C-alpha cells in the first residue's frame, strides 16, 4: 500500500500586487525526497517555500501535511530580535534537555553560540539558523539559500550532514556543486508554473533547454496556423458570400491562446570590454605579509600575476582572503615586502558587502550619480563603455523594468542587488576585474552568462568565491589560504587544488613547515616527492610547471579562432564578428608567444643552476 505524501499542495493560486505568482499549482513531497528548487531570481522560489511551510496563505487551494508530520523552515534573513546570543536563538524551539543537539551542530559548523546577533557576520547568522533547523530534526526541511555567506568548509560539512539525514528536504541554492551532490529530483519554477523532474540538478540544464525548444516549436506551429487561418478569413470574403463563422471564432480562440503565452524572460545583456591593454606583468608581489595585533593573516608570500590570468582565492571565512586581495590591489599596505603593479592597469571592483550601493538611493540614482558613469548636464543619460545610454534602457538590459528604476535599492532581492552592481561594473572599460564573492544570490542563467563573459575577457581576473563549480569553470590558478598564515598557489581550479592538496583539503589542515625567510613549504604530496629545480623560486617553479598547460590551451584557442576566420563569407555577412574574432586571435597569439618566452627563460634558468 502506497504511503500518503509528506506534504501536498493542490490548486494553489497566489497574487502579489496584481501579478500572479502561481496559478493552479500542485506538487507533492514524499518521505525521503531530496529536491532542488530552481528558477530565475524573482520567480517565486522563496514564496513557494513559505507556502510549503504554512507561513504564507495562498489565495486559493489547499496545503495538506501528513498526520504527525513536521516541517522546518530556514529563511534567508532570520529574525534575531529578542535573542541575546546566537545560541539563544538556535535553542529557542527546543526543550532544554535537547540543547545538546544545537551544540553538536555548532561544533560541526564552527559556530560560536555565545556571539551576539549584532556583532555576528552574515555567515555566523546563517550558521545559527542552520543549527536551529538541524537540531529540530523535522521530517521535512525547507532550506532557502543555506550556503549563502558560508565558506567552503561549512558548505562541505552541511553537504555531508544532508547526505546522511533520513529527512526529506527542499533546497534553494545558487551553489551548483551543492545541488548536484544532494538532489535526486528538481522542481523548476518558470513563469508561474512548477514542473518536476525525477532527476537531480545535474540534469536540469538539459531538461530546461529541451522544454524551451519544445515550447518554441509549439509557438512556431501556432503562429503558422494563425497565419493560415487569417489568410482564409480574408480570402473567404470574396470566395464565399457567407463565411464559416465557427471557423472565424476558432481563429479568435487561436489568437487568444497566443496572446496568453507568457514570453520567457531573457538573460541579462551583460558585456565586458577591455580598455587599454595592461602590461604583460600585472602584479608582482615579493615577500608580502600582514598581521593585525597577534593575528597573522599571511606570512611572507610571493605571487606574480600575468595579463590574462584568472586567480581564485579560497579558504575559510575570516582567514584573510579579502585582506590579501586588498594588499595585492594596493588598497592596504603590507607589513613587509612590496607589491608592484604593471603599466596601464585599470581596475574594476565588485564588493561582496554591497557597500557601493546606498540602500536609500533609487536604482536610477545609483547609476546616474556614479562619477564614473555621469554625463555632464544630463540626469537621464549615463556613460556605458564610452557611449551615452539612457538609464532605463541600460537597466532593462540587466532585467530591471521601468517601475524598478525609481524604486529604492533596499527593495531589491540579493540577486537583484548583485545584478545592479554588475551593471555598474560592466559600464566601464577595464583590464583587471577584482571580484569579491560575485556569485552570491545569482541564478543559474546569470551564473552561466558570467562564466562565459569571464572566459572571453582578455584582461586579468582576481576572484574570491566559495562556489566550487564556478571556481572550476573560471580559475587558472587557486591561492589556498588554509589557516595559520599560509597562502599556497596551486595550478587550476577547486578540483585541481583538492587533487594536489589531498582529499581532506577543506576539512583537515596539516601544520606548516617553516621555509626560508619565514615562509612555508608547499604541503602537497607531489611537491614533496618532486622538489622544485634548484635556482628557481617557488613561484617560478610553479609557473614553469603550469606553463605547458597554458601553452596547450592557448594553441587550441588560436586554432579554433583561425578555423572560424577561415570562412570566406564571414567578413561580408558578419563584419562585427569578423573584427572581434580577429582582435581575439591577435591577443591569443601575443599571449601564446609570451607564454613560450616565459617557458624558455625559466627552463634555461633551471638548467643553468
Image (cartoon, helix red, strand yellow):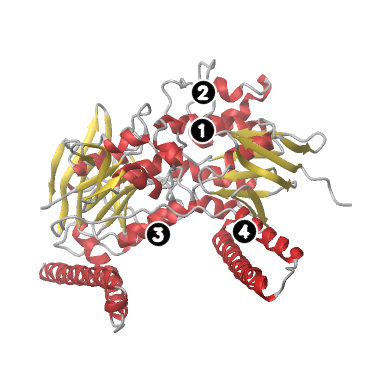
Q: Which residue is mark 2?
A: 86
Q: Position of residue 224 (x, y in %)?
A: 60, 70
Quarter occupied by residue 500: bottom left
In the foreground, 347 or 93? 347
From this view, report whether residue 22 is shown above or below residue 280.
Answer: above
Q: Nearer the viewer, residue 533 or 479?
A: 479
- Mark 4 and mark 1: span between their CA atoms? 47 Å
The numbered mark at residue 127 is: 1
- x and y, in percent, of residue 315 in the image: 37, 44
State the residue at coordinates (24%, 39%).
Answer: 326
Query: Which secondary structure lies at badge 3?
Result: helix
Circle 2 packing at 10 Å, graded few (<14), some (14-19), many (20+), is many
To which residue does mark 3 refer? 473
- First in sequence, mark 2 or 4: give its number: 2
Instruction: Give the residue pinned by disc 4.
Output: 258
Around disc 4, counting alpha carbons within 10 Å, would you say few (fewer than 14), some (14 to 19), or many (20 or more)?
some
Which label is found at residue 412?
Answer: none
Marked residue nearer the N-terminal end (2 or 3)? 2
Q: Distance from label 4 to label 3 (Cα)?
A: 39 Å
Tell me if residue 316 can be seen: no
Lower sequence index among marks 4 and 3: 4
Callout 1 crowding tier (Cα within 10 Å): few <14, some 14–19, many ≥20: many
Q: Residues within 10 Å of mark 3 (few under 14, many from 20)?
A: some
At horizontal 40% and vertical 59% (from top left) the residue drawn is 473
What is the quadrant of residue 88 in the picture? top right
Amino acid at each position: 500500500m502506497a504511503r500518503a505524501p509528506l506534504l501536498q499542495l493542490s490548486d494553489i493560486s497566489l497574487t502579489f500586487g496584481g501579478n500572479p505568482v502561481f496559478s493552479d499549482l500542485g506538487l507533492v513531497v514524499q518521505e525521503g525526497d531530496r529536491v532542488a528548487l530552481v528558477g530565475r531570481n524573482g520567480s517565486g522560489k522563496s514564496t513557494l517555500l513559505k507556502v510549503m511551510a504554512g507561513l504564507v496563505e495562498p489565495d486559493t487551494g489547499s496545503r495538506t501535511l501528513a498526520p504527525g508530520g513536521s516541517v522546518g523552515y530556514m529563511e534567508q534573513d532570520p529574525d534575531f530580535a529578542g535573542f541575546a546570543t546566537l545560541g539563544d536563538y538556535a535553542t529557542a524551539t527546543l526543550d532544554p534537555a535537547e540543547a545538546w543537539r544545537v551544540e553538536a551542530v555548532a561544533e560541526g559548523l564552527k559556530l560560536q553560540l555565545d556571539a551576539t546577533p549584532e556583532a555576528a557576520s552574515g555567515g555566523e547568522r546563517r550558521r545559527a539558523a542552520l543549527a536551529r533547523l538541524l537540531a529540530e530534526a523535522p521530517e521535512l526541511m525547507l532550506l532557502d539559500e543555506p550556503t549563502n555567506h558560508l565558506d567552503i568548509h561549512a558548505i562541505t560539512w552541511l553537504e555531508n550532514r544532508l547526505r546522511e539525514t533520513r529527512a526529506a528536504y527542499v533546497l534553494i541554492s545558487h551553489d551548483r556543486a551543492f545541488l548536484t551532490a544532494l538532489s535526486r529530483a528538481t522542481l523548476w519554477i518558470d513563469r508561474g508554473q512548477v514542473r518536476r523532474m525525477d532527476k537531480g540538478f545535474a540534469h536540469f540544464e538539459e531538461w530546461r533547454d529541451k522544454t524551451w525548444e519544445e515550447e518554441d516549436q509549439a509557438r512556431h506551429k501556432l503562429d503558422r496556423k494563425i497565419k493560415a487561418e487569417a489568410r482564409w478569413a480574408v480570402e473567404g470574403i470574396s470566395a464565399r458570400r457567407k463565411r464559416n463563422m465557427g471557423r472565424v471564432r476558432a481563429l479568435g480562440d487561436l489568437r487568444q491562446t497566443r496572446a496568453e503565452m507568457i514570453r520567457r524572460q531573457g538573460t541579462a545583456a551583460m558585456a565586458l570590454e577591455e580598455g587599454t591593454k595592461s602590461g604583460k606583468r600585472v602584479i608582482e608581489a615579493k615577500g608580502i605579509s600582514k598581521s593585525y595585533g597577534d593575528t597573522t593573516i599571511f606570512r611572507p608570500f610571493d605571487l606574480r600575476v600575468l595579463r590574462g590570468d584568472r586567480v581564485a582565492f579560497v579558504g575559510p571565512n575570516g582567514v584573510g582572503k579579502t585582506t590579501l586581495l586588498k594588499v595585492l590591489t594596493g588598497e592596504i599596505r603590507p607589513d613587509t615586502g612590496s607589491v608592484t603593479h604593471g603599466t596601464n592597469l585599470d581596475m574594476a571592483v565588485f564588493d561582496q558587502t554591497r557597500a557601493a550601493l546606498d540602500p536609500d538611493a533609487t536604482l536610477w540614482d545609483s547609476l546616474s550619480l556614479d562619477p564614473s558613469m555621469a554625463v555632464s548636464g544630463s540626469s537621464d543619460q549615463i556613460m556605458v563603455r564610452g557611449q551615452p545610454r539612457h538609464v532605463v534602457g541600460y537597466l532593462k538590459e540587466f532585467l530591471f523594468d521601468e517601475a524598478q528604476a525609481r524604486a529604492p535599492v533596499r527593495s531589491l532581492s540579493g540577486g537583484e542587488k548583485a545584478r545592479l552592481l554588475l551593471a555598474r561594473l560592466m559600464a566601464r572599460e577595464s583590464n583587471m576585474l577584482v571580484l569579491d564573492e560575485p556569485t552570491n544570490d545569482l541564478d543559474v542563467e546569470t551564473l552561466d552568462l558570467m562564466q562565459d563573459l569571464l572566459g572571453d575577457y582578455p584582461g586579468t581576473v582576481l576572484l574570491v568565491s566559495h562556489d566550487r563549480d564556478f571556481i572550476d569553470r573560471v580559475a587558472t590558478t587557486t591561492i589556498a589560504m588554509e589557516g595559520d598564515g599560509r597562502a599556497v598557489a596551486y595550478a587550476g581550479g577547486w578540483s585541481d587544488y583538492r587533487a594536489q592538496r589531498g582529499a581532506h583539503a577543506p576539512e583537515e589542515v596539516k601544520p606548516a613547515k617553516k621555509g626560508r625567510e619565514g615562509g612555508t613549504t608547499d604541503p602537497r604530496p607531489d611537491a614533496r616527492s618532486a622538489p622544485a629545480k634548484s635556482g628557481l623560486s617557488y613561484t617560478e617553479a610553479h609557473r614553469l610547471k603550469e606553463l605547458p598547460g597554458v601553452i596547450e590551451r592557448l594553441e587550441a584557442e588560436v586554432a579554433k579562432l583561425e578555423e572560424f576566420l577561415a570562412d570566406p563569407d564571414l567578413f561580408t555577412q558578419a563584419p562585427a564578428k569578423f573584427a572581434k574574432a580577429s582582435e581575439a586571435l591577435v591577443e591569443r597569439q601575443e599571449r601564446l608567444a609570451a607564454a613560450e618566452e616565459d617557458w624558455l627563460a625559466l627552463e634555461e634558468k633551471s638548467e643553468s643552476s
